[in-house]
Image: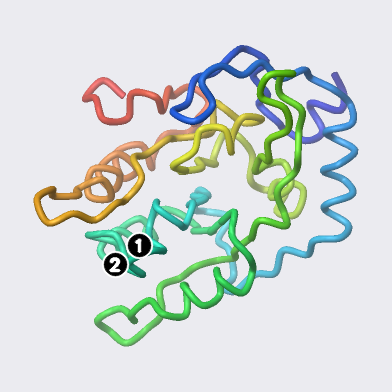
């Protein structure tokens, strides 16, 4: 439809699986796009750093993806990860937490070895998420519609955007653009190399002209 094309939303109306949301089937309804338009008007996305149109867009979850909130501990390889992927991608953060919490966490991150801050282009918090009705059994869930970002930065689309999250339900409206990673729960007896592996994958696909040709479900496999 015209509205689908307008928002570049790669909506997949099939069922999807997740550790917390086992089976979801979401109806494609016009109200979702009206909600995006309303959210766009009331939620300003401000650039912290100028975005470069020559780079692709990487949207990162925060809690349990990059940072453990209970331990207040950055995930292993975080700073090396941000430094490396920042070469190829504009970086945006989208957390389900409050804006104040996101600001505090980002402010606590160490500077790069050269004394410069890591180049986070912008961040969104939980108030930018949109509630949608899944099934009668599951009820309402909140999602992170990438169309809200594409509406603000029109040079980004499903072709050059990838969203990383620990909860697959968050990118339910943009399943093809989403990549699910394991949550970070620090333990003494387990090595966490998730960001190291993710960095390798993101570097490998950085020169791909069209991300819609990729299947991020298999990102840990060589054939991805």
Where is residue 99? Give x, y as percent.
Answer: 64, 69
Classify 215 as above or below 96: above
Residue 210 versus residue 24 in the image, above or below: below
Q: Is residue 102 left or right of residue 191?
A: right
- State the residue at coordinates (45%, 57%): 63
**In the rendered image, the vertical position of residue 118 relative to residue 195, given as above or below:** below
119, 64: nearer the viewer: 64
Q: Which residue is mark 1?
A: 82
The front one of 46 and 66 is: 66
- What residue do we see at 32% from left, 66% from top? 71
Q: Quadrant of residue 171?
A: top right
Q: Position of residue 117 (x, y in %)?
A: 41, 80
Q: Residue furthest top?
A: 14
**Callout 1: 10 Å neighbours few (<14), some, many (20+)?**
some
- Residues tagged 2 and 1 counted as in contact (Cβ below 8 A): yes
- Label 2 vs label 1: CA separation? 5 Å
Total numbered badges shown on the rendered structure: 2
For mark 2, give the secondary structure: helix
Q: Quadrant of the N terminus?
A: top right
Residue 114, percent from left and from top: 28, 84
Q: Is residue 9 left or right of residue 102?
A: right
Tag 1 secondary structure = helix
Specify few, some or many for label 2: CA neighbours under 10 Å numbering under 14, 14-19, or 20 or more.
Answer: some
Q: Quadrant of residue 124?
A: bottom right
- The residue that label 2 is drawn on is 79
User: Which one is in front, 61 or 44?
Assistant: 61
Quadrant containing the C terminus is: top left
Placement of 216 over or under 112, stated as above or below: above
Residue in the image at 40% along x and 53% along y: 64
Residue in the image at 29% along x and 51% along y: 185
């Amino acid at each position: 439809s015209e509205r689908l094309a307008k928002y570049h939303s790669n909506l997949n109306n099939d069922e999807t699986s997740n550790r917390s949301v086992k089976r979801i089937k979401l109806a494609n309804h016009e109200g979702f796009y009206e909600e995006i338009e309303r959210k766009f008007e009331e939620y300003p996305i401000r650039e912290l750093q100028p975005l470069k149109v020559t780079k692709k867009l990487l949207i990162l979850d925060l809690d349990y993806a990059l940072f453990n909130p209970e331990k207040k501990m950055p995930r292993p390889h975080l700073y090396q990860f941000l430094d490396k992927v920042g070469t190829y991608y504009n970086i945006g953060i989208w957390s389900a937490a409050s804006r104040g919490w996101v600001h505090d966490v980002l402010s606590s991150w160490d500077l790069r070895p050269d004394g410069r801050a890591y180049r986070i282009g912008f961040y969104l918090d939980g108030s930018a998420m949109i509630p949608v009705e899944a099934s009668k059994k599951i009820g309402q869930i909140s999602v992170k519609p990438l169309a809200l970002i594409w509406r603000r930065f029109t040079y980004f689309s499903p072709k050059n955007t990838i969203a990383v999250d620990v909860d697959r339900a968050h990118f339910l409206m943009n399943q093809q653009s989403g990549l699910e990673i394991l949550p970070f729960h620090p333990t003494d007896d387990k090595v966490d190399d998730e960001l190291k592996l993710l960095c390798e994958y993101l570097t490998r696909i950085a020169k791909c002209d069209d991300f819609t040709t990729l299947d991020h479900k298999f990102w840990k496999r060589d054939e991805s």
